[in-house]
Amino acid sequence: RSLAVDFAEFGIRVNAVCPGSIHTSATYKHIEHMGTDLEKTLDEFRRSSLLKRQGKPEEVAKAVLFLASYDDSSFITGENLIVDGGLTYT
């Protein structure tokens, strides 16, 4: 958000996309690296999410495209767009 303040005068928008549990090999490698059971952890993510599933990579990509599109988001800056299926609300 401080970057949004610093760059606003130049017409530069600064936003972030914060993904939750996304169906990727990187997610699975991270879970395994933590030493926890993969299926149990994924099941916990699904149960805890309001939408009861993992996100898809293309859903995160669409969030990025939305924020990058001047036509669609020209009046948005300093935001953290959470793409986690409602996990942070549970």
Image (cartoon, rainbow, N blue to C red):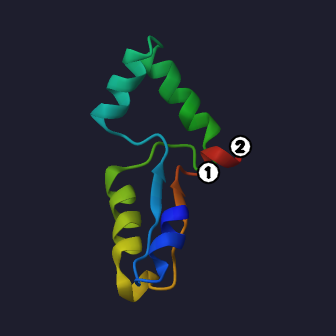
Q: Which mark is residue 1?
A: none
**Residue type at tag 1:** Gly
> Does residue 23 appear to the left or right of 47 in the view shown?
left
**Helix, strand, or loop for circle 1?**
loop
Image position, residue 75 (x, y; %): 51, 85
CA neighbours of label 1 inside 10 A, class few (<14), some (14 to 19), many (20+): some
Residue depicted at 44% across the width and 74% down the height: 7
Quadrant location, the C terminus: top right
| Vertical order, 60 against 66 (above or below) | above
Image position, residue 65 (x, y; %): 33, 70
User: Could you tell me if residue 1 is visible in this image?
Assistant: no
CA neighbours of label 2 inside 10 A, class few (<14), some (14 to 19), many (20+): few
Residue depicted at 55% across the width and 34% down the height: 45
Q: Which mark is residue 86?
A: 1
Residue depicted at 38% across the width and 17% down the height: 32
**Residue type at tag 2:** Thr
How many numbered discs?
A: 2
Measure the C-alpha gap from mark 1 to mark 2. Answer: 7 Å
Image position, residue 80 (x, y; %): 54, 60
| Vertical order, 55 against 42 (above or below) | below
In front here: 15 or 33? 15
> Does residue 33 appear to the left or right of 46 in the view shown?
left
| Vertical order, 76 against 21 (above or below) | below
Quadrant of residue 5 in the image? bottom right
Q: Are marks 1 and 2 in contact (CB under 8 Å)?
A: yes
In front here: 18 or 37? 18
Q: Which residue is mark 2?
A: 90
Residue depicted at 49% across the width and 44% down the height: 20
User: Could you tell me if residue 41 is visible in this image?
Assistant: yes
**Helix, strand, or loop for circle 2?**
loop
